[in-house]
Amino acid sequence: MEIQQVASVSQTEFKLDPNMKLGPVCLRTNNLESMLGFYENDLGLRVIQVQQNLTALGCSKTKEPILILNHDEKALSQPADAAGLYHFALLVPDRQGLAAAYLSLGNKGIVFDGYADHQVSEALYLTDPDGNGIEIYSDRPKSEWKFEEDGEVEMATLPLDLDSLVKELPRGSDAKLTTLVEETRVGHIHLKVTDLQRSMRFYTDILGMEVMRYLGSAAFLSTGRYHHHIGMNTWESLGGPPAQKTCVGLEYFSINIPETNFNELSSMLGIGLDQYDGYKQFFASDPDDISIVFRTS
């Protein structure tokens, strides 16, 4: 796997396709058994492929993985101030799916880190055994999103109306609930970065993403006017070390784009391609050495 640093590429006219979607997130772990127990038993994912030290998990009927676990027995603990993963976010298709996740996880004794109404979405927060943050969320209809005069989307962190959420499900349905319904996918990724302005320049100037919300110490970027595909903040990591390749945590996240857009980007960056399970792909890294795999969708 050859990963190339592309943070020094100058501003271009390239833009990620507005129909791009995030693909699987890969996490490095030194405790595969514990992580599999959590993601299979609690979140309800299933193993769909094992290849050497990589275990891919997805929803029960899909071949496309949501999560890949890279087992590295020698992986060290992650420094608290290092760049890397803040959380990865699993998008369920509707509010009923979010209610099912809330009740199913609660019935299994999972302790949530929090709940939030972000105006554009509603979210549950939890942590896996390695300390990786997870958000499970559903979007509000885009027609209900509000935009400010400068084009930024209105987002906030408000209390989630859990009583209203639970009412989305018929009474007595808890016993048959599935934590993550079939259409669940990675909706966005939220990163810890060490220099917010530098990271914003990379994702906007090189990848052509648009800043949808800027909060001084955090920013939310997307294509196609989505509220965000990439979140980033310096709340714990300002001035810290880059992503640690020998530590537990984020190995890479992936972006699936149409082939013409993919070819344009790889040509612009001058990065060679490889093949994986029928996909063309290449690896690159952002200014904090966070790895990204770009794949044909």
Image: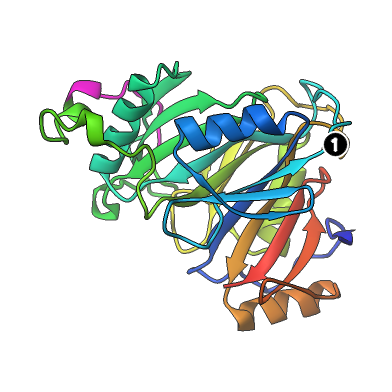
Residue 154: tell me if it is visible.
no
Residue 71 is situated, as x and y percent measured from the top left of the image, at 77, 40
Scheme by which the image is coloured: rainbow
Which residue type carries mark 1? Pro
Q: Is residue 173 above or below residue 223?
A: above
**Residue at the spot x=51%, y=37% of the render?**
40
The stretch drawn in magenta includes residue 159: yes
In this rendering, would 238 be left or right of 172?
right
Q: Is residue 14 above or below residue 128?
A: below
Q: Which residue is mark 1?
A: 242
Q: Is residue 4 above or below residue 127?
A: below
| Quadrant of image for the N terminus | bottom right
**Residue at the spot x=83%, y=27% of the render?**
240
In this rendering, would 230 be left or right of 143?
right
- Predominant SS of the magenta segment: loop
Residue 147 is situated, as x and y percent measured from the top left of the image, at 35, 48
Residue 15: tell me if it is visible.
yes
Bounds of the magenta segment: 155-163
As rendered, which of 278 and 120 lies closer to the eye?
A: 278
